[in-house]
Amino acid sequence: MKLSNKDCLCPKCPSYPFHGESLYCLEGNSRFEVHERGCLCSSCPVYYEKKLEGLYFCNKDLIGDERIFMRRRKKGEDPGDYEKIIQIKIMSKGKNVIGSMGSPKKPPYTFDDINFIPAQIHRMPLNGDAKVNTKVTIGPKAKKPLKVNSPIIISGMSYGAISEKAKKAIALAAKKLGIAYNSGEGGVLQYELKVASSQLILQYSTGRFGLNEDIIKKAAAIEIRFGQGAYPGKGSYLPPEKISSDVARIRGIKKGEGAYSPARHPDIKNVKELGEKIEWLREINPSAPIGAKIGCGDIEKDIRLLIDCGVDFISIDGFGGGTSTAFTHIRDNVGFPLISALPRAAQIIKEEEKRGEVSLIAGGGIRTSADMAKCLALGADAIYIGTAALIALNCEQHRLCHTGMCPTGITTHDPHLMKQFDLEKATKRLENFIKVATGEIADFARVTGKDDIRLLDDSDIFSFKKGLAELAGIKWLDGSIPGGS
Protein backbone atom coordinates (compact mmCIF):
# COMPACT_ATOMS: atom_id res chain seq x y z
CA MET A 1 0.00 0.00 0.00
CA LYS A 2 2.83 2.36 0.79
CA LEU A 3 4.06 2.04 -2.80
CA SER A 4 0.90 3.84 -3.90
CA ASN A 5 1.09 6.74 -1.49
CA LYS A 6 2.04 9.14 -4.23
CA ASP A 7 -1.31 8.44 -5.91
CA CYS A 8 -3.44 8.97 -2.82
CA LEU A 9 -5.73 11.99 -2.69
CA CYS A 10 -6.16 12.05 1.12
CA PRO A 11 -4.07 15.21 1.59
CA LYS A 12 -6.31 16.98 -0.92
CA CYS A 13 -9.59 15.71 0.55
CA PRO A 14 -11.81 18.63 1.68
CA SER A 15 -13.44 16.37 4.31
CA TYR A 16 -10.28 15.25 6.05
CA PRO A 17 -8.76 17.58 8.68
CA PHE A 18 -5.43 15.81 8.41
CA HIS A 19 -3.29 18.37 10.29
CA GLY A 20 -0.12 16.89 8.89
CA GLU A 21 -1.27 13.26 9.22
CA SER A 22 -1.34 11.13 6.10
CA LEU A 23 -4.02 8.44 5.94
CA TYR A 24 -3.76 5.99 3.07
CA CYS A 25 -7.07 4.13 3.37
CA LEU A 26 -5.77 0.74 4.47
CA GLU A 27 -2.89 1.86 6.69
CA GLY A 28 -5.15 2.65 9.63
CA ASN A 29 -8.20 4.48 10.90
CA SER A 30 -8.35 8.22 11.04
CA ARG A 31 -7.81 9.92 14.36
CA PHE A 32 -10.32 12.55 13.36
CA GLU A 33 -14.04 12.90 12.91
CA VAL A 34 -14.46 12.88 9.14
CA HIS A 35 -17.53 14.17 7.36
CA GLU A 36 -18.78 12.37 4.29
CA ARG A 37 -19.51 15.47 2.22
CA GLY A 38 -16.73 16.30 -0.16
CA CYS A 39 -14.97 12.94 0.17
CA LEU A 40 -13.06 11.88 -2.94
CA CYS A 41 -13.03 8.07 -2.39
CA SER A 42 -15.01 7.56 -5.57
CA SER A 43 -12.21 9.13 -7.62
CA CYS A 44 -9.20 7.84 -5.66
CA PRO A 45 -6.78 5.80 -7.84
CA VAL A 46 -5.63 3.75 -4.83
CA TYR A 47 -9.24 2.76 -4.13
CA TYR A 48 -9.58 1.27 -7.61
CA GLU A 49 -6.08 -0.17 -7.82
CA LYS A 50 -6.60 -2.17 -4.61
CA LYS A 51 -10.17 -3.14 -5.55
CA LEU A 52 -11.52 -1.76 -2.30
CA GLU A 53 -15.21 -2.22 -1.52
CA GLY A 54 -17.71 0.03 0.20
CA LEU A 55 -17.22 3.67 1.00
CA TYR A 56 -14.40 4.56 3.35
CA PHE A 57 -14.87 8.25 4.04
CA CYS A 58 -11.61 7.65 5.93
CA ASN A 59 -13.51 6.64 9.09
CA LYS A 60 -15.18 3.37 8.07
CA ASP A 61 -14.81 0.22 10.16
CA LEU A 62 -15.28 -3.37 9.09
CA ILE A 63 -18.15 -4.76 11.18
CA GLY A 64 -18.78 -8.41 12.05
CA ASP A 65 -18.05 -11.45 9.91
CA GLU A 66 -20.18 -10.24 6.99
CA ARG A 67 -17.66 -7.63 5.77
CA ILE A 68 -20.00 -4.73 6.37
CA PHE A 69 -18.44 -1.28 6.16
CA MET A 70 -19.92 1.00 8.77
CA ARG A 71 -19.01 4.51 9.83
CA ARG A 72 -17.26 4.76 13.15
CA ARG A 73 -19.26 5.88 16.16
CA LYS A 74 -19.38 9.64 16.38
CA LYS A 75 -18.31 11.55 19.45
CA GLY A 76 -21.22 11.79 21.86
CA GLU A 77 -23.27 9.17 20.02
CA ASP A 78 -25.04 6.72 22.32
CA PRO A 79 -23.18 3.35 22.17
CA GLY A 80 -26.44 1.43 22.49
CA ASP A 81 -27.99 3.23 19.54
CA TYR A 82 -24.87 2.64 17.45
CA GLU A 83 -24.87 -1.07 18.35
CA LYS A 84 -28.49 -1.40 17.23
CA ILE A 85 -27.58 0.12 13.86
CA ILE A 86 -24.83 -2.49 13.50
CA GLN A 87 -27.25 -5.29 14.41
CA ILE A 88 -29.70 -4.15 11.74
CA LYS A 89 -26.88 -4.04 9.17
CA ILE A 90 -25.89 -7.64 10.00
CA MET A 91 -29.52 -8.82 9.93
CA SER A 92 -29.97 -7.14 6.54
CA LYS A 93 -27.47 -9.70 5.26
CA GLY A 94 -29.84 -12.48 6.34
CA LYS A 95 -27.78 -13.42 9.40
CA ASN A 96 -28.45 -13.59 13.12
CA VAL A 97 -26.22 -11.46 15.29
CA ILE A 98 -23.79 -13.69 17.17
CA GLY A 99 -21.61 -12.68 20.08
CA SER A 100 -19.30 -14.07 22.73
CA MET A 101 -19.07 -13.83 26.52
CA GLY A 102 -21.88 -12.48 28.68
CA SER A 103 -24.42 -9.80 27.92
CA PRO A 104 -23.15 -6.20 28.04
CA LYS A 105 -26.51 -5.14 29.49
CA LYS A 106 -26.15 -4.04 33.11
CA PRO A 107 -28.89 -5.04 35.61
CA PRO A 108 -30.01 -2.40 38.12
CA TYR A 109 -28.45 -4.38 40.98
CA THR A 110 -25.09 -6.13 41.17
CA PHE A 111 -23.01 -7.86 43.83
CA ASP A 112 -21.12 -4.58 44.21
CA ASP A 113 -24.27 -3.23 45.89
CA ILE A 114 -23.73 -5.66 48.80
CA ASN A 115 -21.19 -5.38 51.63
CA PHE A 116 -20.27 -7.65 54.51
CA ILE A 117 -21.06 -6.70 58.11
CA PRO A 118 -17.84 -6.89 60.15
CA ALA A 119 -17.76 -8.66 63.50
CA GLN A 120 -16.47 -6.36 66.25
CA ILE A 121 -17.63 -6.99 69.85
CA HIS A 122 -21.04 -8.73 69.80
CA ARG A 123 -19.21 -11.29 67.68
CA MET A 124 -15.47 -10.87 67.31
CA PRO A 125 -13.47 -11.33 64.10
CA LEU A 126 -10.86 -14.05 63.73
CA ASN A 127 -7.17 -13.33 63.37
CA GLY A 128 -5.55 -13.69 59.97
CA ASP A 129 -3.77 -16.88 60.98
CA ALA A 130 -6.95 -18.57 62.26
CA LYS A 131 -7.82 -21.65 60.24
CA VAL A 132 -10.99 -21.47 58.17
CA ASN A 133 -12.54 -24.52 56.57
CA THR A 134 -13.03 -24.01 52.82
CA LYS A 135 -14.04 -27.57 51.96
CA VAL A 136 -17.53 -28.25 50.64
CA THR A 137 -19.54 -31.31 49.68
CA ILE A 138 -21.72 -31.55 46.58
CA GLY A 139 -24.64 -33.95 46.94
CA PRO A 140 -24.16 -34.99 50.57
CA LYS A 141 -26.96 -37.59 50.37
CA ALA A 142 -25.43 -39.43 47.41
CA LYS A 143 -23.63 -42.73 47.97
CA LYS A 144 -20.35 -41.02 47.11
CA PRO A 145 -20.67 -37.24 47.53
CA LEU A 146 -18.26 -35.03 45.62
CA LYS A 147 -15.94 -33.59 48.27
CA VAL A 148 -13.73 -30.69 47.19
CA ASN A 149 -11.25 -28.30 48.79
CA SER A 150 -12.89 -25.09 47.60
CA PRO A 151 -16.40 -23.88 46.81
CA ILE A 152 -15.06 -22.66 43.44
CA ILE A 153 -16.02 -24.96 40.56
CA ILE A 154 -14.90 -24.42 36.97
CA SER A 155 -18.10 -24.37 34.95
CA GLY A 156 -18.94 -26.27 31.79
CA MET A 157 -16.91 -25.08 28.81
CA SER A 158 -17.11 -27.58 26.01
CA TYR A 159 -14.37 -28.94 23.80
CA GLY A 160 -14.98 -26.97 20.65
CA ALA A 161 -15.93 -23.82 22.48
CA ILE A 162 -12.45 -23.87 24.03
CA SER A 163 -9.27 -25.51 22.81
CA GLU A 164 -7.76 -28.84 23.77
CA LYS A 165 -4.96 -27.08 25.64
CA ALA A 166 -7.45 -25.03 27.64
CA LYS A 167 -9.36 -28.20 28.56
CA LYS A 168 -6.12 -29.82 29.69
CA ALA A 169 -5.14 -26.82 31.80
CA ILE A 170 -8.50 -26.88 33.58
CA ALA A 171 -8.23 -30.61 34.32
CA LEU A 172 -4.67 -30.25 35.59
CA ALA A 173 -5.56 -27.33 37.87
CA ALA A 174 -8.61 -29.18 39.22
CA LYS A 175 -6.53 -32.24 40.04
CA LYS A 176 -3.74 -30.24 41.65
CA LEU A 177 -6.11 -28.20 43.84
CA GLY A 178 -8.69 -30.89 44.57
CA ILE A 179 -11.55 -28.84 43.14
CA ALA A 180 -14.41 -29.78 40.82
CA TYR A 181 -14.72 -28.93 37.14
CA ASN A 182 -17.49 -29.44 34.59
CA SER A 183 -17.01 -31.11 31.21
CA GLY A 184 -19.37 -28.87 29.28
CA GLU A 185 -21.57 -30.33 26.57
CA GLY A 186 -18.92 -31.21 23.98
CA GLY A 187 -17.95 -34.64 25.27
CA VAL A 188 -14.98 -35.62 27.41
CA LEU A 189 -11.32 -35.90 26.45
CA GLN A 190 -9.56 -39.11 27.41
CA TYR A 191 -6.96 -36.84 28.98
CA GLU A 192 -9.58 -35.48 31.38
CA LEU A 193 -10.65 -38.97 32.42
CA LYS A 194 -7.04 -40.01 32.93
CA VAL A 195 -5.93 -36.93 34.86
CA ALA A 196 -8.95 -35.81 36.89
CA SER A 197 -12.01 -38.07 36.60
CA SER A 198 -12.35 -37.93 40.40
CA GLN A 199 -13.17 -34.20 40.11
CA LEU A 200 -15.26 -34.36 36.91
CA ILE A 201 -18.87 -33.21 36.79
CA LEU A 202 -20.17 -34.71 33.55
CA GLN A 203 -22.65 -32.53 31.73
CA TYR A 204 -25.55 -34.52 30.27
CA SER A 205 -26.83 -31.98 27.77
CA THR A 206 -29.67 -31.86 25.28
CA GLY A 207 -27.26 -32.53 22.40
CA ARG A 208 -25.75 -35.63 24.09
CA PHE A 209 -22.47 -35.00 22.27
CA GLY A 210 -19.82 -37.64 22.91
CA LEU A 211 -21.71 -39.35 25.73
CA ASN A 212 -21.85 -43.06 26.43
CA GLU A 213 -22.41 -45.30 29.44
CA ASP A 214 -18.70 -45.90 29.95
CA ILE A 215 -18.06 -42.17 30.39
CA ILE A 216 -21.10 -41.81 32.65
CA LYS A 217 -19.71 -44.56 34.90
CA LYS A 218 -16.41 -42.69 35.32
CA ALA A 219 -17.85 -39.31 36.31
CA ALA A 220 -17.63 -38.02 39.88
CA ALA A 221 -21.00 -36.26 39.44
CA ILE A 222 -23.55 -35.90 36.64
CA GLU A 223 -25.36 -32.70 35.72
CA ILE A 224 -28.42 -32.82 33.47
CA ARG A 225 -28.27 -29.54 31.61
CA PHE A 226 -31.58 -27.89 30.75
CA GLY A 227 -30.28 -24.39 30.14
CA GLN A 228 -27.69 -21.77 30.95
CA GLY A 229 -27.57 -18.06 31.58
CA ALA A 230 -26.42 -17.01 28.11
CA TYR A 231 -29.28 -18.72 26.27
CA PRO A 232 -31.95 -20.18 28.57
CA GLY A 233 -34.81 -21.74 26.65
CA LYS A 234 -32.76 -21.99 23.45
CA GLY A 235 -30.30 -24.70 22.49
CA SER A 236 -26.65 -23.86 22.09
CA TYR A 237 -24.79 -23.36 18.83
CA LEU A 238 -21.17 -23.91 17.87
CA PRO A 239 -20.35 -22.45 14.43
CA PRO A 240 -18.55 -24.43 11.70
CA GLU A 241 -15.41 -22.36 12.27
CA LYS A 242 -15.04 -24.04 15.67
CA ILE A 243 -15.50 -27.63 14.43
CA SER A 244 -12.05 -29.11 13.84
CA SER A 245 -11.53 -32.76 12.88
CA ASP A 246 -10.94 -33.73 16.50
CA VAL A 247 -13.88 -31.71 17.82
CA ALA A 248 -16.08 -33.44 15.24
CA ARG A 249 -14.73 -36.84 16.30
CA ILE A 250 -15.35 -36.25 20.01
CA ARG A 251 -18.82 -34.82 19.39
CA GLY A 252 -19.77 -37.46 16.84
CA ILE A 253 -20.55 -34.97 14.05
CA LYS A 254 -19.09 -34.02 10.67
CA LYS A 255 -16.20 -31.59 10.37
CA GLY A 256 -17.25 -28.17 9.13
CA GLU A 257 -20.86 -28.52 10.26
CA GLY A 258 -22.31 -26.27 12.92
CA ALA A 259 -23.25 -28.08 16.12
CA TYR A 260 -26.74 -27.37 17.41
CA SER A 261 -28.18 -28.52 20.73
CA PRO A 262 -31.97 -28.74 21.06
CA ALA A 263 -33.74 -26.40 23.47
CA ARG A 264 -35.01 -29.43 25.41
CA HIS A 265 -34.15 -33.07 26.00
CA PRO A 266 -35.84 -35.31 23.41
CA ASP A 267 -36.71 -37.94 26.02
CA ILE A 268 -37.66 -35.64 28.91
CA LYS A 269 -41.07 -34.19 28.09
CA ASN A 270 -42.46 -34.02 31.63
CA VAL A 271 -41.57 -34.43 35.29
CA LYS A 272 -42.22 -38.17 35.23
CA GLU A 273 -39.70 -38.68 32.44
CA LEU A 274 -37.20 -36.49 34.28
CA GLY A 275 -37.50 -38.74 37.32
CA GLU A 276 -37.00 -41.78 35.09
CA LYS A 277 -33.90 -40.21 33.55
CA ILE A 278 -32.40 -39.56 36.98
CA GLU A 279 -33.04 -43.17 37.99
CA TRP A 280 -31.51 -44.42 34.71
CA LEU A 281 -28.36 -42.40 35.36
CA ARG A 282 -28.20 -43.75 38.92
CA GLU A 283 -28.41 -47.29 37.60
CA ILE A 284 -25.37 -46.64 35.42
CA ASN A 285 -23.44 -44.75 38.10
CA PRO A 286 -24.98 -45.59 41.51
CA SER A 287 -22.44 -43.58 43.53
CA ALA A 288 -22.27 -40.19 41.84
CA PRO A 289 -24.47 -37.23 42.81
CA ILE A 290 -27.04 -36.49 40.09
CA GLY A 291 -28.06 -32.88 39.57
CA ALA A 292 -29.57 -30.46 37.08
CA LYS A 293 -28.55 -27.12 35.62
CA ILE A 294 -31.15 -24.51 34.73
CA GLY A 295 -31.16 -20.94 33.50
CA CYS A 296 -32.88 -18.51 35.84
CA GLY A 297 -36.52 -18.56 34.79
CA ASP A 298 -39.45 -19.67 36.94
CA ILE A 299 -37.07 -20.43 39.80
CA GLU A 300 -39.59 -21.39 42.49
CA LYS A 301 -41.53 -23.90 40.39
CA ASP A 302 -38.47 -25.34 38.65
CA ILE A 303 -36.57 -25.97 41.88
CA ARG A 304 -39.55 -27.54 43.64
CA LEU A 305 -39.99 -29.95 40.72
CA LEU A 306 -36.29 -30.83 40.69
CA ILE A 307 -36.40 -31.54 44.43
CA ASP A 308 -39.47 -33.74 43.91
CA CYS A 309 -37.53 -35.69 41.27
CA GLY A 310 -34.78 -36.49 43.76
CA VAL A 311 -31.79 -34.51 42.52
CA ASP A 312 -28.69 -34.27 44.70
CA PHE A 313 -27.72 -30.79 43.54
CA ILE A 314 -29.13 -27.89 41.53
CA SER A 315 -27.07 -25.46 39.45
CA ILE A 316 -28.59 -22.12 38.52
CA ASP A 317 -27.02 -19.88 35.88
CA GLY A 318 -28.07 -16.25 35.80
CA PHE A 319 -28.44 -13.65 33.07
CA GLY A 320 -25.00 -12.33 32.21
CA GLY A 321 -23.35 -15.73 32.22
CA GLY A 322 -20.70 -16.12 29.55
CA THR A 323 -20.50 -18.42 26.56
CA SER A 324 -18.35 -19.00 23.50
CA THR A 325 -21.14 -18.36 21.01
CA ALA A 326 -24.64 -17.00 21.54
CA PHE A 327 -27.40 -15.37 19.55
CA THR A 328 -27.37 -11.90 21.06
CA HIS A 329 -31.14 -11.38 20.87
CA ILE A 330 -31.50 -14.24 23.38
CA ARG A 331 -28.36 -13.55 25.41
CA ASP A 332 -29.30 -9.92 26.02
CA ASN A 333 -33.05 -10.25 26.59
CA VAL A 334 -33.86 -13.50 28.42
CA GLY A 335 -33.49 -14.60 32.03
CA PHE A 336 -33.20 -13.27 35.58
CA PRO A 337 -29.80 -12.13 36.88
CA LEU A 338 -28.21 -14.34 39.51
CA ILE A 339 -28.41 -11.69 42.22
CA SER A 340 -32.22 -11.81 42.10
CA ALA A 341 -32.61 -15.56 41.49
CA LEU A 342 -30.14 -16.91 44.05
CA PRO A 343 -31.92 -15.79 47.25
CA ARG A 344 -35.21 -17.08 45.82
CA ALA A 345 -33.65 -20.46 45.02
CA ALA A 346 -32.10 -20.73 48.46
CA GLN A 347 -35.43 -19.85 50.08
CA ILE A 348 -37.25 -22.65 48.23
CA ILE A 349 -34.66 -25.22 49.29
CA LYS A 350 -35.06 -23.99 52.86
CA GLU A 351 -38.87 -24.15 52.67
CA GLU A 352 -38.68 -27.69 51.32
CA GLU A 353 -36.40 -28.56 54.27
CA LYS A 354 -33.63 -29.72 51.94
CA ARG A 355 -30.90 -27.37 53.12
CA GLY A 356 -27.86 -29.59 53.75
CA GLU A 357 -29.28 -32.33 51.53
CA VAL A 358 -29.66 -30.72 48.10
CA SER A 359 -26.63 -28.62 47.18
CA LEU A 360 -27.09 -25.29 45.40
CA ILE A 361 -24.45 -24.14 42.89
CA ALA A 362 -24.62 -20.54 41.64
CA GLY A 363 -23.16 -19.17 38.42
CA GLY A 364 -23.53 -16.37 35.91
CA GLY A 365 -21.23 -13.36 35.79
CA ILE A 366 -19.23 -14.14 38.94
CA ARG A 367 -15.74 -12.66 38.77
CA THR A 368 -14.18 -11.80 42.12
CA SER A 369 -13.73 -13.50 45.48
CA ALA A 370 -16.15 -10.92 46.91
CA ASP A 371 -18.80 -12.01 44.40
CA MET A 372 -18.18 -15.62 45.39
CA ALA A 373 -18.38 -14.99 49.14
CA LYS A 374 -21.58 -12.99 48.70
CA CYS A 375 -23.12 -15.90 46.77
CA LEU A 376 -22.31 -18.19 49.69
CA ALA A 377 -23.91 -15.72 52.09
CA LEU A 378 -27.03 -15.61 49.89
CA GLY A 379 -27.42 -19.38 50.13
CA ALA A 380 -25.16 -21.05 47.57
CA ASP A 381 -23.07 -24.05 48.59
CA ALA A 382 -20.63 -23.62 45.71
CA ILE A 383 -19.92 -21.26 42.82
CA TYR A 384 -19.40 -21.82 39.12
CA ILE A 385 -16.84 -19.64 37.35
CA GLY A 386 -16.29 -19.67 33.59
CA THR A 387 -15.09 -16.37 32.17
CA ALA A 388 -13.04 -15.66 35.30
CA ALA A 389 -11.23 -18.98 34.81
CA LEU A 390 -10.52 -18.14 31.17
CA ILE A 391 -9.15 -14.73 32.13
CA ALA A 392 -6.86 -16.45 34.63
CA LEU A 393 -5.65 -18.77 31.84
CA ASN A 394 -4.81 -15.66 29.76
CA CYS A 395 -8.06 -14.55 28.08
CA GLU A 396 -7.93 -10.85 27.23
CA GLN A 397 -11.63 -10.41 26.37
CA HIS A 398 -11.17 -9.85 22.64
CA ARG A 399 -14.69 -11.31 22.28
CA LEU A 400 -13.66 -13.32 19.23
CA CYS A 401 -14.56 -16.71 20.74
CA HIS A 402 -17.24 -17.43 18.12
CA THR A 403 -14.88 -16.75 15.20
CA GLY A 404 -12.23 -19.36 15.99
CA MET A 405 -9.60 -16.58 15.82
CA CYS A 406 -8.79 -16.16 19.52
CA PRO A 407 -5.28 -14.61 19.61
CA THR A 408 -4.46 -16.15 23.01
CA GLY A 409 -5.15 -19.72 21.86
CA ILE A 410 -7.91 -20.37 24.40
CA THR A 411 -10.99 -20.57 22.17
CA THR A 412 -9.41 -21.54 18.86
CA HIS A 413 -8.30 -24.73 17.13
CA ASP A 414 -5.98 -22.98 14.70
CA PRO A 415 -2.53 -24.62 15.19
CA HIS A 416 -0.71 -21.31 14.74
CA LEU A 417 -2.87 -19.47 17.27
CA MET A 418 -2.74 -22.36 19.74
CA LYS A 419 1.03 -21.87 19.93
CA GLN A 420 0.27 -18.72 21.92
CA PHE A 421 -1.10 -20.91 24.73
CA ASP A 422 1.58 -22.14 27.14
CA LEU A 423 -0.02 -25.09 28.95
CA GLU A 424 2.29 -25.06 31.95
CA LYS A 425 2.07 -21.31 32.53
CA ALA A 426 -1.69 -21.19 31.96
CA THR A 427 -2.29 -24.04 34.40
CA LYS A 428 -0.20 -22.29 37.04
CA ARG A 429 -2.06 -19.00 36.54
CA LEU A 430 -5.41 -20.74 37.00
CA GLU A 431 -4.15 -22.52 40.11
CA ASN A 432 -2.91 -19.23 41.55
CA PHE A 433 -6.20 -17.45 40.89
CA ILE A 434 -8.27 -20.16 42.58
CA LYS A 435 -5.88 -20.39 45.53
CA VAL A 436 -5.97 -16.63 46.09
CA ALA A 437 -9.74 -16.41 45.59
CA THR A 438 -10.34 -19.29 48.03
CA GLY A 439 -8.08 -17.58 50.57
CA GLU A 440 -9.98 -14.32 50.18
CA ILE A 441 -13.30 -16.10 50.70
CA ALA A 442 -11.81 -17.41 53.94
CA ASP A 443 -10.92 -13.81 54.83
CA PHE A 444 -14.57 -12.79 54.53
CA ALA A 445 -15.43 -15.60 56.94
CA ARG A 446 -12.78 -14.34 59.40
CA VAL A 447 -14.08 -10.77 59.12
CA THR A 448 -17.55 -12.00 60.12
CA GLY A 449 -16.13 -14.07 62.97
CA LYS A 450 -16.63 -17.50 61.41
CA ASP A 451 -14.21 -20.41 61.00
CA ASP A 452 -16.07 -22.17 58.19
CA ILE A 453 -17.19 -20.66 54.88
CA ARG A 454 -20.32 -22.80 55.08
CA LEU A 455 -21.43 -20.66 58.03
CA LEU A 456 -21.66 -17.51 55.92
CA ASP A 457 -25.32 -16.50 55.62
CA ASP A 458 -27.58 -13.57 54.86
CA SER A 459 -27.15 -12.13 58.36
CA ASP A 460 -23.55 -11.32 57.38
CA ILE A 461 -24.41 -8.91 54.55
CA PHE A 462 -26.33 -5.73 53.83
CA SER A 463 -27.16 -3.73 50.71
CA PHE A 464 -26.59 -0.08 49.90
CA LYS A 465 -29.81 -0.17 47.87
CA LYS A 466 -33.16 -0.58 49.59
CA GLY A 467 -34.73 -2.33 46.62
CA LEU A 468 -32.04 -5.00 46.56
CA ALA A 469 -32.22 -5.44 50.33
CA GLU A 470 -35.95 -6.11 50.04
CA LEU A 471 -35.47 -8.40 47.04
CA ALA A 472 -32.77 -10.49 48.70
CA GLY A 473 -34.20 -10.40 52.21
CA ILE A 474 -31.09 -8.80 53.69
CA LYS A 475 -30.39 -5.70 55.78
CA TRP A 476 -30.41 -2.18 54.39
CA LEU A 477 -28.29 0.75 55.56
CA ASP A 478 -30.40 1.29 58.68
CA GLY A 479 -29.94 -2.32 59.79
CA SER A 480 -33.52 -3.33 59.08
CA ILE A 481 -34.77 -5.77 56.43
CA PRO A 482 -37.18 -3.83 54.16
CA GLY A 483 -40.52 -5.57 53.92
CA GLY A 484 -39.55 -7.98 56.68
CA SER A 485 -41.67 -8.76 59.68
Image (cartoon, rainbow, N blue to C red):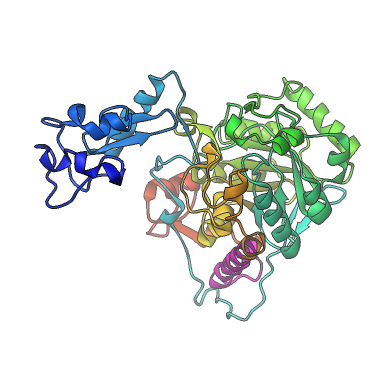
Q: Quadrant of residue 93?
A: top left
12 shown above or below 302? below
Question: x%, y% of residue 88?
Answer: 35, 24
Residue 289 is left or right of residue 165, and the answer is: right
Q: Nearer the viewer, residue 404 or 386?
A: 404
Q: Judge by depth and name the residue closer to the eye, 334 or 313.
A: 334
Q: Give the mark count.
A: 0
Q: Residue at x 61, y 67 (%)?
A: 432
Residue at image x 71%, y 26%? 254
Q: Is residue 358 left or right of residue 61?
A: right
278 left or right of 396 in image? right
Magenta includes 461? no
Boundaries of the magenta span: 429-453
Does 448 appear in magenta? yes
- Could you tell me which residue is drawn at 73 percent across and 45 percent down? 358
Task: Say whether residue 76 is visible.
Answer: no
Viewer-proximal residue among 345 and 26: 26
Secondary structure, magenta segment, majority class: helix
Quadrant of the image occupied by residue 235: top right
* Relative image position of residue 240 (x, y in whole percent): 60, 30
